[in-house]
Amino acid sequence: SRLPLLLRAMPKAELHIHIEGSLEPELIFALAERNGVDLPYADVEALRAAYAFTDLQSFLDIYYAGASVLLQEEDFYDMTMAYLRRAVQDNVVRAEIFFDPQTHTERGVAMGTIIHGLTRACRDAHAQWGISAELILSFLRHLSEEDAIATLEAALPFRDQFIGVGLDSSELGHPPEKFTRVFARAKQLGLRLVAHAGEEGPPAYVWGALNALAVERIDHGVQSEKDAALMQHLVERGIPLTVCPLSNLKLCVVDDLTQHNLPRMLDAGLKVMVNSDDPAYFGGYVNDNYVQLFAATGMGAEHAYQLARNSLEATFASPQQQAAWV
Ligand code: ADE
Ligand code: ZN
């Protein structure tokens, strides 16, 4: 079949990628050496061997350990250029990239160091390869709302260098309502709003993200299927769901890709598309996600077209910019 070729060649947007989750083991070790950081793993093979996850938290523990090698502006730049170079190979024309500043400011890294490194890479990648890339500042939901508010305030000198805010990390026990005030503040500032919801958490968390936080997209959202009224609401409002099949598989949200509910959600009229989440940890970049999901579920060229179209229509780029892609 020529379907994998179509999936790889079609222009697409990637809207759910954590830049810290693009750090490959080789780059983690290179940065550890450059910065004199000690890692609790002997080598690249030992680190990769630890990538056997049972749930979201078992992944997050290793993901935050990997991010501990990021100290200098150059580290954030090199990480982001490596991701964007890879995204261009996958025919990604637009990337909206999450970063977790609290993971770094907690270790004494300045907000400006983080954002300048990321921004410089987005600019250079655009100039060299034509890819459009923007940043979304994501709050860690296992920390307090006060900490999130302080993080947003610390990022305000760089307000023009990110387009929105998101919410990630440990979902269960940290409902969206915990972050009502910081999302209201972000909205006042003209920032676009998204949140992880319904990855492991219940449909009530998706309702919470929509009603309490006023988000414009839901990250993951795969648990929405358990609530028929929620499904109808998502279809009627045209709320995009940024789904990540290999992530769901590796974090045991689904037992098998053949069981993944993306085809059902697409057929139900939801604006879903395919993303990589944390490609260095989950065994594939965005095209690997498309190819493996299609091989497992038997979707065809019409589904491919709709998913790519959904991804481009769900971006926060201007309508003029979108018209150039769709
Ligand atoms: N941080 C990085 N990847 C994440 C995911 N899939 N869910 C929640 N937080 C994350
Ligand atoms: Zn995610």
Image (cartoon, rainbow, N blue to C red):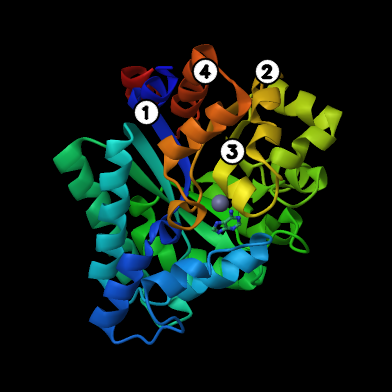
Residue at 68% x, 61% y is 54
Kindly tell me whether mark 4's CB lies below 8 Å from ligand 2.
no
**Alpha carbon separation for disc pair 1 and 4:** 15 Å
Which residue does the numbered mark 3 point to in the structure image? 243
Q: Earlier in the sequence, mark 3 or mark 4?
A: 3
Q: Are marks 1 and 3 in contact (CB under 8 Å)?
A: no
Q: Position of residue 313 (x, y in %)?
A: 47, 24
Bin the neighbour count of mark 4 within 10 Å (Cα to Cα): few under 14, some 14-19, many 20 and up.
some
Q: Which mark is residue 301?
A: none
When asked about the image quadrant of residue 176, the answer is bottom right
**Earlier residue among tags 3 and 2:** 3
Q: Residue at x 31, y 56 (%)?
A: 80
Amino acid at dot 3 = Val
Which residue extends farthest top?
A: 302
Name the secondary structure under disc 1.
helix
Task: Tell me if residue 293 can be seen.
Answer: yes
How far separated are the C-alphas under marks 3 and 4?
Answer: 14 Å
**Does label 1 or label 3 sit earlier along the sequence?**
1
Q: Marks 2 and 4, Cα distance to the nearest angstrom?
A: 10 Å
Q: Residue at x 68, y 60 (%)?
A: 55
Kindly identify which residue carries mark 4: 306
Task: Indicate which disc residue 267 carries.
Answer: 2
Report if the beta carbon of the residue with label 1 is closer than 8 angstroms to ligand 2: no
